[in-house]
Image: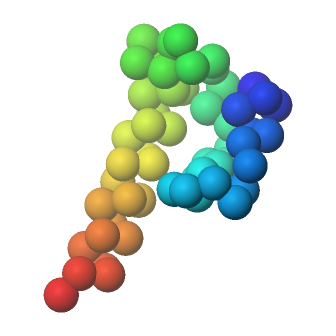
Amino acid sequence: MTSIKSVNAERSPKPIILEPDAACDHFTYFTNPHGLKNLAQALYTSQKNIDTNSG
């Protein structure tokens, strides 16, 4: 999991590193309960930020 966090922070778009770790690798995000939970949280947070910043 460390390699995914070593993306250059200056790239565009900037990477968003979520904590805590998803407790699974990128192959099992959609089949692992921990990955799904973290994915849902990331999407919820993103939508909340979009709703707050729009308007």
Q: Is 38 positioned to the left or the right of 46 in the image?
A: right
| Above or below: residue 48 compared with residue 2 | below
Question: Measuring 38% from the left and 59% from the top, which residue is drawn there?
Answer: 46
Asked whether 16 or 28 is in front, the reply is 16
Asked if residue 38 is positioned above or below residue 53 in the image, the reply reads: above
The location of residue 20, given as percent across then percent down, is 68, 44
Taking depth in this image into account, of 41 and 18 the one nearest to the observer is 18
- Name which quarter of the figure residue 11 lies in: bottom right
How far from the left and from the top, in percent, is residue 2? 81, 31
- Residue at the (43%, 47%) spot, across then down: 41
Q: What residue is drawn where x is 18% and y is 87%? A: 55
Compared across the picture, whether 43 is left or right of 8 comes to left
Relative to 46, say whether 32 is above or below. above
Which residue is at 71% across, 32% downward?
A: 4
Left or right: 52 as drawn, with respect to 12: left
Residue 10 point in image, percent of width and height:
69, 60
Quadrant occupied by the N terminus: top right
Q: Is residue 12 above or below residue 54?
A: above
Residue 6 in the image, given as x and y percentages of width and height: 79, 40
